[in-house]
Amino acid sequence: FYFRTTDVTGVVNLPEGVEMCMPGDNVTMDIELITPIAIEEGLRFAIREGGHTVGAGVVTEIEG
């Protein structure tokens, strides 16, 4: 995940019944970052894989 200038690894938890996302899908998912970073609701981020952007998102809720 790429937040502003920070690249951080995280674990994606998809909703029950969803196994994968395809281009054009809009999915609400939970992401657990392995390193704590400063983020806020409304912050946009990119999902990157192998140096390529494969998705984008917006932080909607931050859990403790």
Image (cartoon, rainbow, N blue to C red):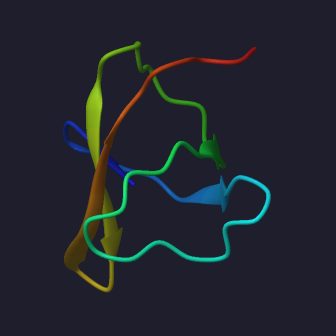
Q: Is 54 left or right of 19, judged from the image as shown?
A: left
Q: Position of residue 14 (x, y in %)?
A: 67, 57
Q: Is 52 left or right of 49, judged from the image as shown?
A: left
Towards the viewer: 39 or 22: 22
Q: Quadrant of the C terminus?
A: top right
**Relative to 41, residue 58 above or below:** below
Task: Name the image quarter holding residue 58.
Answer: top left
Task: Name the image quarter holding residue 16.
Answer: bottom right
Q: Is 33 left or right of 6, judged from the image as shown?
A: right
Q: Quadrant of the N terminus?
A: bottom left
Q: Is 18 left or right of 58, judged from the image as shown?
A: right
**What's the residue at 25%, 66% (across, down)?**
24
**Relative to 51, residue 56 above or below:** above
Q: Position of residue 44 (x, y in %)?
A: 25, 33
Towards the viewer: 24 or 30: 24
**What's the residue at 45%, 52% (across, down)?**
8
**What's the residue at 40%, 13% (across, down)?**
40
**What's the residue at 76%, 65% (across, down)?**
17
Q: How many marks?
A: 0
Q: Position of residue 13 (x, y in %)?
A: 71, 55
Q: Position of residue 32 (x, y in %)?
A: 67, 44
Residue sticking out furthest to the bottom: 50
